[in-house]
Image (spheres, rainbow, N blue to C red):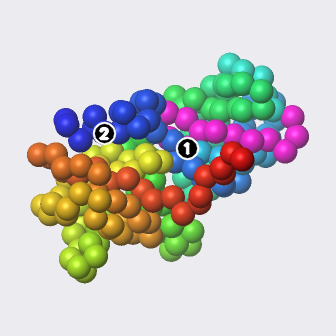
Amino acid sequence: MPGLAFFNSVDQRVYPRVPLILPATLILASQELPCLVTDISGGGAGLQYPDCAPGADVNAKLAIDEFGTFDGITVRDSGDTRALRFLQGEAERNHLLIKLILYVEEGLADASQQGRWPTEAKLSLTRTNGIRERCEVIRISLQGVCLVTEQRPPLQELVKLGRMYGRVAQHFSDGIPISFLSFVQPETVT
């Protein structure tokens, strides 16, 4: 699929991570550890612990109120960076994709407060001329999203996706990749 090549050049992970800050609990055989989820993807989650962290290669469950409970294996990437590699099937990954899309579309708090989750992998695309379309999501990552759409907005056109903004990056026969805008200026070296 040509639309995927754009994302492979931006993020080499099989399952790109989406940044979050959510309280969670890591459940081990003998204890429960409070933690913060710093990012999440179809393959795992980045974790920070206020106290001690478990060692690597430990079977655990990660309970995140808004997302559910995930079986996995603890991983120590380097230094203080910790993660949980998920052990789950494709159906569960697709369910997580829906929740990540909702995070972009409406904000996670709105959905969890209303007690509902969408049943399809679609986002609302709004162009600067006001034209709206519900688009199927091919792929979503921290850097952007690739959508199946009938429209072909000009390259670099500013579009709104739920509560986020982005620019049309390319055109493919099966859709358009959109790069999310960052409103945080990177630090400059002086």
Q: Which mark is residue 6?
A: 2
Q: Which mark is residue 165?
A: none
Q: Is residue 184 left or right of residue 105?
A: right
**Three-letter code, disc 2:** Phe
- Mark 1 to mark 2 CA distance (whole Å): 21 Å
Q: Earlier in the sequence, mark 1 or mark 2?
A: 2
Residue carrying label 1: 40
Q: What residue do we see at 77% from left, 23% from top?
A: 55
- Is the residue under label 2 in contact with that under label 1 (CB below 8 Å)? no
Q: Residues within 10 Å of mark 1 (few under 14, many from 20)?
A: many
Q: What residue do we see at 61% from left, 52% from top?
A: 186
Q: Residue furthest bottom?
A: 130
- Give SS at disc 1: strand
Q: Nearer the viewer's eye, disc 1 or disc 2?
A: 2
Q: Where is residue 154 in the image (x, y as percent from the top left)?
A: 20, 62
Q: Looking at the image, can residue 122 be seen?
A: no
Q: Which residue lies furthest to the front in this view?
A: 190
- Give SS at disc 2: helix
- When asked about the image quadrant of residue 3, the answer is top left
Q: In this view, does 15 lie to the left or right of 177?
A: right
Q: Where is residue 138 in the image (x, y as percent from the top left)?
A: 27, 46
Q: Looking at the image, can residue 113 be seen?
A: yes
- When asked about the image quadrant of residue 112, the answer is bottom right
Vertical comparison of 73 with 51: above or below? above
In the image, the segment drawn in magenta is: 40-52
Q: Where is residue 62 in the image (x, y as percent from the top left)?
A: 64, 40
